[in-house]
Amino acid sequence: MTTTTQPRTLKTRARLIEAATAIVAESSFTDLRVEEVVRRAGVAKGTFFTHFKDKDALLDRMIGGIIDWHLDQISAQTTPETIDAILDILTPLMTFMGSERAVFDVILRYSGAASVEEIGPIAATFERFVHVLSGWFVDGPFRQDADPATLAEGVQAFVFQALALNFCALNSHRPVRDRLRPYLELWLHPAKALDPQG
Amino acid sequence: MTTTTQPRTLKTRARLIEAATAIVAESSFTDLRVEEVVRRAGVAKGTFFTHFKDKDALLDRMIGGIIDWHLDQISAQTTPETIDAILDILTPLMTFMGSERAVFDVILRYSGAASVEEIGPIAATFERFVHVLSGWFVDGPFRQDADPATLAEGVQAFVFQALALNFCALNSHRPVRDRLRPYLELWLHPAKALDPQG
DNA sequence: ATTCATTATTGACCACGGTCAGTTTTGTGT
DNA sequence: ACACAAAACTGACCGTGGTCAATAATGAAT
């Protein structure tokens, strides 16, 4: 119980993340290799795994950071009053989520927390996602007969559905936005759908 | 342009699938190793990859077959008239989909088709899933203001959402069934939710 | 039967994520 | 200054999915 963590620990970890970020900037998440990360950071391969449980843990952190930035942008905007406004606000985040198959795969794998004690960065952002969207659904123009959190979780489910279909080459000519809209119409405005007058 | 496909090809492929099936029966999809499959089938490793693009293609086929069997069972039953009946019918399939992380991962990856010309087995089963469920939603007790296929796709999205949350240890004590129900209530019976009388 | 193009098979090899016993560094107590 | 335990680091090594140039089997045409 004397020394616990780290002087150089933080420095090494920062170098690893910096190297990884540079690689992604130059090429992509898909082409990220642990060996290249440690080469650029100037450490041995084993060191990487003392800082990250596995490669996915690094991706979890990097991608989680990007999603968090998007949620900052989303939170900063005024509460959307229409489906189209929601689609506008969500589009940049969805574009990132669907930018690479590897990115979407990691997000899918980590969108539910891995374990109780260890909620990863991506899982945390999706808790935040539900929280932010819940705020839109209390006292708004959208359906008021449902728990706002449940509505938000539904939107999340439809975002994933729309993105998954987007990776199907058969449909990939349609923008994700257009694929998501019909779901949100039915999910957030059931009364309008029931009543032709709107 | 004389001989195309093959006598022994089918035989070898059958042996590979048979070996893989035996391994899964003895242990699990998680523990399936290509080297073990080829060892049991009595062929070289390279042979495996002339029959399957990659390991996932074998899993796609095996898991697709099982899902297809579940859809046979689902189709054979009478059309459900309530949310609970839907949950009853879907539970066995959901139980399989959530039985192993490895299984769910493959399903997620392949639930959208890989490419236009090559719709994999799992992708095909999810087209069939939507088709079967669409049948439930024409002229039934559920909402009639929406395209049945869209309703079915929504159910699919919620099934995935419920399963994904189930792999979150935080929530895994709740049956998937109970996690799915609130979504379906709001999705299939919006009018009921709006009108307290039901 | 023999040839020969087509197709299936082989297994050494590679790529890459991940492990671990051994070594070095670090900070603290004396 | 020195000793020493805790923490960080190392790199050879492993497991496993996937590749490919070389080889063998096949079957149709002669």
Image: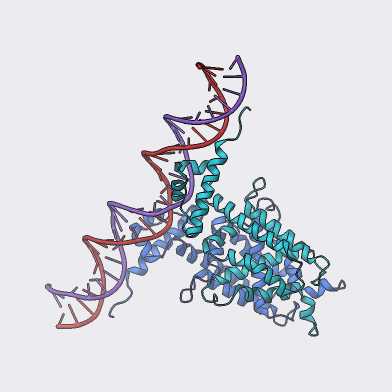
Chain colours: A cyan, B blue, C purple, D red
Q: Is residue B78 visible in this depiction of the protein?
A: no
Q: What residue is drawn where x is 36% and y is 67%?
A: B11
Number of labels in the image equals 0
Rendered-image quadrant of the N terminus of chain A: top right
Q: Residue furthest right?
A: B197
- Work out whether residue A91 can be spotted: yes
Q: Position of residue C4 (x, y in %)?
A: 17, 75
Residue A122, position in %: x, y? 63, 55
Say if B89 sits above or below D7 in the image: below
Q: Nearer the viewer, residue B169 or A179?
A: A179
Q: Where residue A153 appears, x then y in whole percent?
A: 71, 63
**Quarter that holds the C terminus of chain A:** bottom right
Who's the residue at 46% across and 76% down the image? B117
Q: Residue at x 57, y 55 (%)?
A: B101
- Report the residue that reaches farthest toward the bottom: A197
The x and y percentages for residue B87 are: 70, 66
In the picture, measured across the screen, residue B66 lies left or right of residue B176, that is left
In the image, is residue B55 above or below residue B188?
A: above
Is residue B117 shown above or below A63?
below
| Quadrant hosting residue A135 | bottom right
Q: Nearer the viewer, residue A154 or B136?
A: A154
Q: Quadrant of residue B78?
A: bottom right
In front: A121, or B188?
A: A121
